[in-house]
Image (spheres, grey):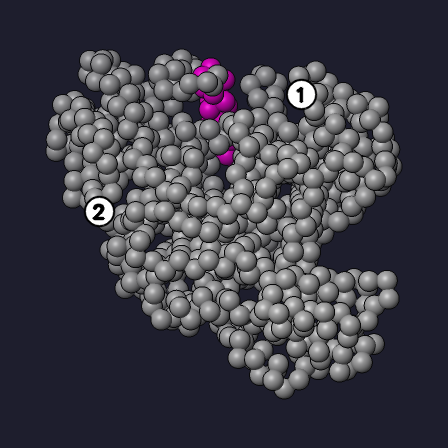
Amino acid sequence: MSEFDLFDECKKINSLFNEEKEEEAREALINLLDYIRNNIDIELQPLSHRQFFYHLIRMSGLYPYLDKYIEDAIFEDKLVYNFFSISDNKKSIVLHREQLRVLNVLLSGQNVLLSAPTSFGKSYIIDSLISIKKPKNILIIVPTIALLDETRRRIYKKFNKYNYNIIVAPEKEIDSSCNNIFIFTQERAFLYINKILKLDLFIVDEFYKIGDEDKMRSSILQQVVIYFKSISKQSYFICPNVHKIECSFIKDIKFINLNNFKTVINNEEYIDKIDKEFIDKDKVLLLFYKSNPYNIEYPESYIDKFYRLLNKYIKIKDEQNLIYVYKLADIKLILTVLLLLYKDYLKININSETSKIIEWISKNYTENWFLIEGLKYGIGIHNGKIHRFLAQIQIELFNQKKIKTIVATSSIIEGVNTEIQNVFLWSMKENKKRISVFKYKNIIGRAGRMNKYFKSNAYRLSYSKFNSTKTETLKVDINTENILDYSDTLFDKYLSDDDKKNIDNFREDIINKIGETEFNDIVKQNITKNNRNDILNIVDNLCNINTYELKKELSVFCTNEWMNKTEYLENILCKYVKDEDVNKISQFIIVISDIWGKGLKNTLSILTKLKIVNVDDYFKFENLVSYKIYNIFSDIDTFQKKILLEEAIDMSSFINNLQNVFLPPHVYTLEEFGLPRMLSKTIDESGIIKFNFDEKDGINKTLNKFIEKKDDIIKLFDVNSFDYYFLQYFYDGIDIKI
């Protein structure tokens, strides 16, 4: 637009509307909005021209974009704008045309599966529906803890003060006579099958996970959907970029496909040739080898990819960038190369905005961690392994533009809202296969945000001829990985004859070993953690030794005797853990068993000195303990009780400690709320709130203590410290300002 003429640009867009080319017109309008924001003072344009422009915004259905212009809009456009304005308990929000369309269908009581692009504003529909209909009991399923926290923060701020209990962690007692909003991952929801008996609204976000390649997780989600859909008055399922769905158990649902209604524009580009070379290939080669001191073998294509990545990245380094990788190892490699680029060639000054978090990480973790070096230059990391509060706070700093670049795995793409301008796809493969169009669109959809960035860019470094216009069908095959018995359930009619035969054989085998009554009791409780094959392996091992030897093997775990020798843990883990160093895992568990007393930094120092793990691997091992190792011992405990009966070993304390990585249970849970364990330790030592290892109350009672004793807790921390920043972030998540 060399000589900008607002009226002329509006005429072109209006012609597209007149020709009924609405999608093309909307895209042209978004481009115009972006150009005006970056280049034009709209107030200097003639009023009649501005009103023409505002009218086109209204015609596009993108009513929220009228917000800053509404005072000068014509009466007709103001009328429509106000019609699409609704209250969500705290303030009025303006929905766009298709949001209101979906909301009206939901308000009519219909079950809905909505497929719409990222940045559509799907969460506004949920909030508006709850605000208007005020359902009594609501269950929201999300796939990850990161998205659970984001959803909890949003819902808590809007509905906690309106007689809703917000429940995000398992509670022993559920009062269904109260108004409850449950926000769970599928694993947590699975525990409530046959315990929650009635729902008014059942919501599944990122519904595509129901057909996920992770068969165990998809199996759990499928059972959760089948059960809770059957007891709920209304269901609302949400996913992006699906144009058709084939699923046997949701045929009675209205499928609304709005994937073509875009609120932002994602420009896609394969980076091939470099227009302007900022750094040549020889220098890139040098950076690559300097970043790889252990001479790990990488494909030669990495050098060329780095050459193209770095030359593009340098041009836009001051914008908000995401570099997506598939493997955790690539996070460190890419971050290290970027750091060398900044230090050796760009001579960029250290980012003062992140100095406090750098000081905090050095104090509480270690001074020697590549994340610290990255943050010095405004580069963060995000993956599913690092501590939740660290991931959360980096996203917070990124959205505040204090961090400019995030190098991340898929943990960031599953619904986490970020304000990203550019996405670089370092990885276009998973498990040696090219990623699907569906996943590709979900990744690039992280960029662009309604009312934040009208346009965004997605840069591919491989697959020049990747066809992103291909439509996707979500095919849901029934996964039976963790179904122990299908009799007296809702799953029976969805299972094939082969599925039933496999389950029947498993059932018969287990009953022969522990008895029918005991087996039925386990099924009824819904407490097993592993798939059928792993459970069968556990039961076989428990039954293949005599009672005396079994009690001897397990009895060390009802005292602290297991801490004396790694062989106690190794003897059990070697039967169930494959492709992992069982000796290292056993040493790791013994060292972290006193983490609440010694603190994380001292524990990390011990682990490093003993060459068990360093900080890079610490998070992987902690996740392994709290999930996989916990699941193994949990199922061992479940079945040993049925085998040994009155002689059963009480392993509950040890198993709870595995689940909470040897922290008091509420301390570990509070990390989901954004409160680091280090702050919880300070609060515990002050006596203001004491955290117990045998905590019986639910997390909501502890949250109430934080609210009641807020003033005393605040006094423990320097207002200029990053501890205080974390405390503010935590309290903000429960709608308390400090």
Name the spot of residue 52 as percent of width and height, x first: 71, 78
Report the residue at 60% width, 49% height from top.
446
Instruction: Please indicate whether residue 496 sits to the left or right of residue 18 in the image.
Output: left
Quadrant in the picture for residue 386: top right
User: Which one is in front in this view, the residue at disc 2 or the one at disc 1?
Assistant: 1
Report the residue at 55% width, 61% height from top.
261
Q: Which residue is mark 2?
A: 490
Q: Is residue 472 visible?
A: yes
Q: Main secondary structure of the magenta part?
A: helix
Locate the C terminus and report the quarter of the image it occupies. bottom right
Name the spot of residue 473 as percent of width and height, x first: 44, 46
Quadrant in the picture for residue 113: bottom left
Instruction: Please indicate whether residue 256 sits to the left or right of residue 546 in the image.
Output: right
How crowded is the residue under tag 2: few (<14 C-alpha within 10 Å), some, or many (20+)? few
The amino acid sitting under disc 2 is Leu
- Is residue 673 shown above or below 60? above
- Is residue 112 shown above or below 569? below
Report the residue at 35% width, 16% height from top.
575
Report the residue at 29% width, 63% height from top.
233
Q: Which residues are magenta?
A: 582-596
